[in-house]
Image (cartoon, rainbow, N blue to C red):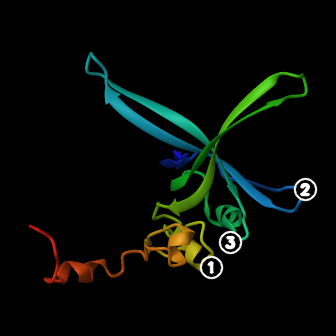
Amino acid sequence: MSRSLNKVTLIGNLGNDPEVRSTTGGNRVATFSLATSRSWNDASGSKQEKTEWHRCVVWNTKSSQLADIVEKYVKKGDKLYVEGRIEYRQWQDKENQTRYSTEINVRELIMLGGGSGGGSRSGGADGDAEAAGGTRARSAAPAKAKAGAGGDDFEDFPGALADEDDDLPF
């Protein structure tokens, strides 16, 4: 059976403060626009730049309160790393026109800027105090890796480099 993957990774800046609301079922959701830019020189040698805007959606789940973290700590202009999946939606508006939307359903978020904290936050069940950050950057491995599924933030990695008893052929 073939497998597929829907994964998006973005690093960009927030265009506005996040909007946070509650659904009728009581679930919390945060939305924000993330800007990514690229620049290049055209054929004549002049510098060109293009900015893309990405609509990002962050939900609270049983294992994380990521929408609440976004509401507390993320502000306009902040640099973020987001990881999630892309979703395309369509619906009929009040005038019966078909509308389309492309969204990034965020599963992991790391605050990159050093200004208001610069800590990190993933979709895991860590406490709010770590999301506030301090200035210490931390690896934001997915929640299942933190639960012991194979990757423990590489804490043993430096020690592995010092081992002279390895099977490497070079």
Picture residue at 63% right of the left edge, 75% below the top: 125
From the viewer's perspective, is residue 26 above or below residue 47? Answer: below
- Give the mark, 2 or 3, whose residue is nearer the N terminus: 2
Instruction: Between residue 29 and residue 50, name the one nearer to us.
Output: 29
Picture residue at 30% right of the left edge, 22% below the top: 46
- Give the mark, 2 or 1, whose residue is nearer the N terminus: 2
Type of amino acid at the residue the image marks with label 1: Gly
Give the spatial CA distance, label 2 vs label 3: 20 Å
Name the side, left or right, on which 167 lies relative to 88.
left
Residue position marked by numbered label 3 in the rendering: 63
Furthest residue toward left: 170
**Residue 39: where, in percent of width, then height?**
37, 33
**Residue 159: where, in percent of width, then height?**
25, 83
Residue position marked by numbered label 2 in the rendering: 24
Residue position marked by numbered label 1 in the rendering: 127
**Front disc: 2 or 3:** 3
Labels 1 and 3 touching (C-beta < 8 A): no
- Binning the other alpha carbons within 10 Å of mark 3 as few (below 14), some (14 to 19) or many (20 upward) gives few
Type of amino acid at the residue the image marks with label 2: Thr
Q: Quadrant of residue 87?
A: top right
Name the side, left or right, on which 159 lies relative to 3.
left
Instruction: Between residue 38 and residue 99, name the one nearer to us.
Output: 99
Give the quadrant of the C terminus.
Answer: bottom left
**Front disc: 1 or 3:** 3
From the viewer's perspective, is residue 50 above or below residue 154? Answer: above
Give the spatial CA distance, label 1 vs label 3: 11 Å
Type of amino acid at the residue the image marks with label 3: Ser
